[in-house]
Amino acid sequence: MPTPAVTAEGLEKRYGEVRALAGVDLTVDEGSLVGVLGPNGAGKTTAVRILATLLRPDAGRATVAGHDVMTEPDAVRAAIGLTGQYAAVDENLTGRENLELVGALLHLGRRAAKDRAGELLGAFALDDAGDRPARTYSGGMRRRLDLAASLVGRPAVLFLDEPTTGLDPASRIALWEVVEGLRRDGTTILLTTQYLEEADRLADRIAVIDGGRVIAEGTSTELKDRLGEDVVDLRIVDAARTPEAIGLLRELAAADPRVDAATGRITLPVHHGAGILAEVVRRIDGAGLEVAELSLHRPSLDDVFLALTGRSAEAAEAAREVAAPPRRGLFGRRRGAAATANVEPVPAVTTEVTA
């Protein structure tokens, strides 16, 4: 049996009347990458902060690298690396100085910190920019530097909380390749994301979280197989007639049709989709409904997301962009290199961290 590197059992967390976590259960085996997928406000970041000893749960227990996050926080911090949603680097320091500072905070010693900084700059293709101030870096370069900072202490377990947020496609793919290399080298990784392609490509297993609970878990293939053989997607030009379209098509579906309230997209799980598609067109046309979009495809992770959470990932991402908080470090301060490090002086409970 695989050895769990991270376990969470019944984690709960409240902020006043808001129940951020409602009993999260999660296991990450050693050397694996588990993706935690969910809409904005689902509880992903709260769970990561508890596992990283930045928050204290109201109920439940969790272990990381064999250590209890409540009773052995120092041992947990010594075993982990953490990269938050926004690059937490000091813009006035060079890339090399950022990494050397983290090494100093980890008590590596001056020579070891310098050597480790050089090693990571090379590994993350930042050699040429290593002696430039971080404020001159592109967004993708800052994220790579931020991830490098979380690896200065050679952590056994790495927490990546939406690490590619805001990156352009090329930078995102470059960071994916770095993460894949870390996984091949045996690092245990817990990755939170709202990007379906990211979870599909990187994760050995995926946990879908919504409303503070894990509502589904499995490999990407296992989750897609829940929806049946094929999926018909359509959208009616007159959104007010969407319920009428659902009524016409319900008996053709292998499971209940679903509607994305934000986009009006109807998702119809079906068997033998090629034959069903012609009947869908006949019924819609016979009722005088005008179709804006119509497609037939195999189930995708987006279909799974919609089926489980009631919204598409596209709508969830739009909501996240609207609700995104000001950029700041995990400790409620302006960005700083220490936010990504396993720094011993950080208290087990940091009251400045918000949900």
Image (tube, helix red, strand yellow):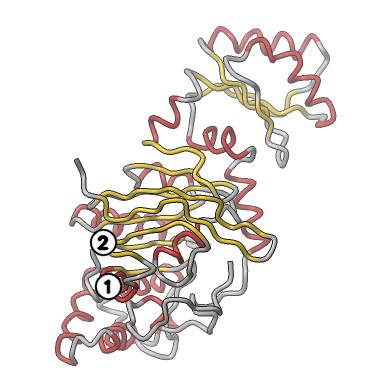
Q: Position of residue 36 (x, y in %)?
A: 44, 50
Q: Quadrant of residue 67?
A: bottom left
Task: Label 1, secondary structure: give it.
Answer: helix
Q: Quadrant of residue 48?
A: bottom left
Per the model, the C-alpha gap separating discs 2 and 1 is 9 Å
**Tag 2–tag 1 contact (CB < 8 Å):** yes
Query: Residue flagged by tag 2: what amino acid is it?
Result: Ala
Q: Earlier along the polypeptide chain: callout 2 or callout 1?
A: 2
Q: Residue at x 76, y 16 (%)?
A: 247
Please state if 239 lies on the left or on the right of 300 as rendered: right
Q: Position of residue 276 (x, y in %)?
A: 59, 10
Rendered image: mark on residue 75: 1
Please state if 10 lies on the left or on the right of 21 as rendered: left
Q: Which residue is mark 2?
A: 65
* 159 relative to 256, above or below: below
The crowd level at tag 2 (other Cα within 10 Å; few <14, some 14-19, many 20+) is many
Task: Label 2, secondary structure: give it.
Answer: loop
The crowd level at tag 1 (other Cα within 10 Å; few <14, some 14-19, many 20+) is some
In the rendered image, the quadrant that contains the C terminus is bottom right
* 136 relative to 176, above or below: below
Please state if 176 lies on the left or on the right of 271 as rendered: left
Q: Residue at x 20, y 52 (%)?
A: 184
* 10 relative to 235, above or below: below
Q: Position of residue 162 (x, y in %)?
A: 46, 59
Query: Residue flagged by tag 1: what amino acid is it?
Result: Ala
In the rendered image, the quadrant that contains the N terminus is top left
* 274 relative to 308, above or below: above
Q: Nearer the viewer, residue 41 or 62?
A: 62
Rendered image: mark on residue 310: none
Q: Residue at x 51, y 62 (%)?
A: 46
Q: How many marks?
A: 2
Q: Position of residue 125 (x, y in %)?
A: 27, 70
